[in-house]
Amino acid sequence: MMTGQRIRDLRKEKRLSQTELADVVHVSQQTITAWENDKAEPSSSAIAALADYFGVTTDYLLGRTPTPQFTAKEENDLQVILKNTINGLSNEAGLSYLKNGGIDLDDESAELMKDSLERALRRAQLLAKEGFTSKR
């Protein structure tokens, strides 16, 4: 997918007109049209402004990554969810369903579970983000 298509999809996702997006990034509506039709490329400062506004990475806008990567806020949110989930699993009640015949998980197994949980959470959030973006 080209940069213009990604800009268009993100703009429509936010339900913005080209004029409204132009006001956000301080360009003309005609410039937005040219970008979306791949008749012109946004400057590096415009790419940065668009990425900040839409909460995606510049690499995503430029087509270097197939899915929107995590923004700093999303990364922080993911870490909070992960921490809360792990804390919930760390107490006796939370771990009770993870016990095998009444034996607690050893440290290595607990660390493996934490890593697996983090990978699964990251993948689920990226798939959700990709699905949400591609449906618009």
Image (cartoon, helix red, strand yellow):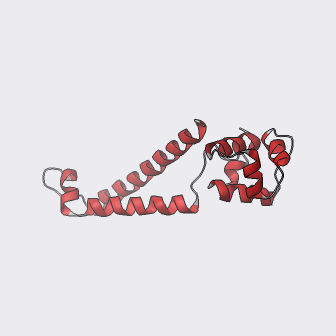
Query: Which one is nearer the viewer's eye here, 16 or 109?
Result: 16
Number of marks drawn: 0
Looking at the image, residue 89 sits to the left or right of residue 67; the answer is: left
Going 60% across and 45% down the picture, which residue do you hit?
Answer: 67
Q: Residue 36 is drawn in which quadrant?
A: top right
Relative to 9, say whether 27 is above or below: below
Where is the N terminus found, in terms of image quarters?
top right
Q: Residue 24 is drawn in which quadrant?
A: bottom right
Looking at the image, residue 127 sits to the left or right of residue 41; the answer is: left
Query: Which one is nearer the viewer's eye here, 109 or 97?
Result: 97
Looking at the image, residue 11 sits to the left or right of residue 23; the answer is: left
Q: Where in the figure is residue 20, as x and y percent of width and height?
A: 73, 51
Looking at the image, residue 97 sits to the left or right of residue 128; the answer is: left
Name the outermost residue toward the top: 135
Going 52% across and 58% down the picture, which residue do you hit?
Answer: 74
Going 84% across and 43% down the picture, which residue do you hit?
Answer: 34
Going 67% across and 41% down the picture, which residue do you hit?
Answer: 9
Q: Where in the figure is residue 35, as x and y percent of width and height?
A: 81, 44
Where is the C terminus found, in terms of image quarters?
top right
Name the outermost residue toward the left: 102
Query: Which one is nearer the viewer's eye here, 104 or 17?
Result: 17
Q: Where in the figure is residue 104, as x and y percent of width and height?
A: 19, 58
Q: Residue 17 is drawn in which quadrant?
A: top right
